[in-house]
Image (cartoon, grey):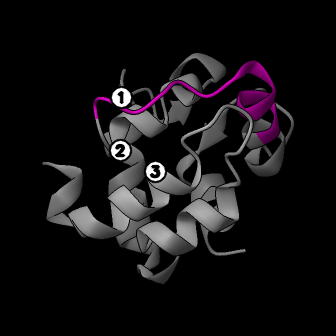
Amino acid sequence: MSITDVLSADDIAAALQECQDPDTFEPQKFFQTSGLAKMSASQVKDVFRFIDNDQSGYLDEEELKFFLQKFESGARELTESETKSLMAAADNDGDGKIGADEFQEMVHS
């Protein structure tokens, strides 16, 4: 599966353009611009599985650091503060990782 199987390449490019500079990544803005926020819960969970590199069922900080690169290989890494902010926005149970349900809730919040 490629991310462009479910999201428009133009929408992804626009979302990445908005956060190309370090410390400008805003999750909700990214989800809106990329089209992720308009997807169904099951489609968002499909995207989650694509982002989950080790297929553990969870995203940890190391995977989140490369979040943007899952949408386009040449995209930048998230900064440490962006990574921690993204984790805090979704990790509802405080276990230090984001499950598919938590990710879906964050995208649709």
SS under mark 3: helix
The residue indicated by pointer 1 is 55
Q: Is residue 37 left or right of residue 102?
A: left
Return the residue at label 2. 49
How crowded pointer 3 is (Cα within 10 Å; few <14, some 14-19, many 20+) is rated as: many
Percent coordinates x, y for residue 80 in the rendering: 75, 20
Q: Is residue 11 left or right of residue 97?
A: left
Residue drawn at (67%, 55%) of the image: 27
Residue ID for mark 3: 16
Instruction: Report the magenta residues as a range.
Output: 73-85
Identity, as a three-letter code, of the amino acid under mark 1: Gln
Tag 2 secondary structure: helix
The picture quadrant where one finds residue 31 is bottom right
Q: Would residue 7 be seen by someone viewing this image from the given angle?
A: no
Using the image, determine if residue 3 lies above or below residue 8: above
Q: Is residue 83 left or right of residue 67?
A: right
- Whether residues under marks 2 and 1 lie with C-beta atoms below 8 angstroms apart, the answer is yes
Which residue is more in the foreground, 94 or 75? 75
